[in-house]
Image (cartoon, rainbow, N blue to C red):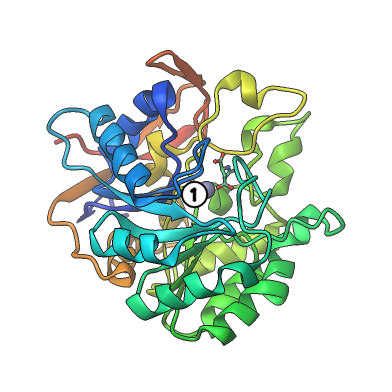
Amino acid sequence: MTETITIRRPDDWHVHLRDGAMLEAVAPFTARQFGRAIVMPNLSPPVTSAASAAAYRERIMAAVPDGSDFTPLMTCYLTDDADADDLAAGHAAGIFTAAKLYPANATTNSAHGVTDVAHIMPVLERMQDIGMPLLVHGEVTDGEIDIFDREAVFIERILEKLIAALPGLKVVFEHITTEQAVQFVDSAGPNIAATITPHHLHINRNAMFVGGIRPHAYCLPVAKREQHRLALRTAATSGSPKYFLGTDSAPHEIDAKESACGCAGIFNAPYALESYATVFDEEGALDRLEGFASLHGANFYGLPINEAMVSLQRSEFQVPDDIETAGSRLVPFHAGAIMKWQIVQS
Ligand code: NCD
Ligand code: ZN
């Protein structure tokens, strides 16, 4: 049995670092695990200009421990009146790595999202021209569509048409949760990729209802049936360069989760790599963890591979029930559970 693995330092291609006190609380966890991270722009108000992204990047750097080699990669929140020139200028200046499409009202702080992709076609055409990746929250928001079907319906109604209209656009289908998404990504060209979270590899929708309602297992897109979880595990561990690590770590204060109208989001940043390693071990695919965690994403984004290395060892520890830090109280993914892999502290 493999007892230790050493891989390139991984990157997180989808994370919510928040702002203010919450940023102070959570940024050190991501900076400890990852060399770079694609930072989601769904602040309130959202990050829609290069100037606001540059200022946010400064605040992130101030929240990361001294001496950390962490680099935040910024994204632009697309709205119906997104400006192609500002976006392209921000990309050229190295401020914006990518842009994020939230369908209006799909999830946390997405009220300003795009109401119809037709409104932003000129922006998407420019992104295609300059090779700037589009990151997609792939759910329709139509209240008549069952919440468990919203991703599959988004593929049919929006995504297939979008990539047919813009065949050269680089698209990352974020935090995929269904076998339909896996089939879509597998059958698309090399410019279409997907991130997969640790929680969608570990839990199916039952996790939200074990003995009562479990708000800490609620996120968007919501976890689906077991057959979908298994399809995601096959995709993540397949070795395909189309799939890479994106935690979608989405912290909310404990009171905002444990509420009559609890927020969507799972805070997995503290033990994300350990969580993925457990999945790859269970699937007999530890030799493919490095590709998924540290190589495929950088290659897709056209960025260099990290030089630093990280080791994990087979060794048990218990995840705390909650984490109190910098004035926030947060419940981590796997709270109270035994993890079987641990990062070797250097
Ligand atoms: C995210 C958040 O809280 O910002 N929540 C989540 O459940 N993933 C938003 C998102 O990525 O959908
Ligand atoms: Zn997200």
Q: Is residue 329 above or below residue 62?
A: above
Give coordinates of residue 8: x percent, y percent: 20, 56
Does the closest atom of ligand 1 sit within 8 Å of the Cβ of label 1? no
Q: Quadrant of the N terminus?
A: bottom left
Quarter of the picture holding the C terminus: top left
- Residue 27, horizontal then vertical, whole percent: 34, 32
Q: Residues within 10 Å of mark 1 (few under 14, many from 20)?
A: many
Q: Which residue is mark 1?
A: 198
Vertical side of 209 occupied by 327: above or below = above
- In the image as oriented, which residue stretches furthest toward the top? 327
Q: Is residue 144 left or right of residue 136?
A: right
In the rendered image of this protein, does residue 338 appear above or below residue 207?
above
Res. 86 in view: yes
Q: Position of residue 115 (x, y in %)?
A: 68, 59
Residue 342 can be seen in this image: no
Point 49% across, 49% down: residue: 198
Splitting the image into 4 quarters, where does residue 76 fall?
A: bottom left
Viewer-side residue, 298 vs 1: 298
Mark 1 residue type: Pro
Residue 146 percent location from the top left of the image? 83, 56
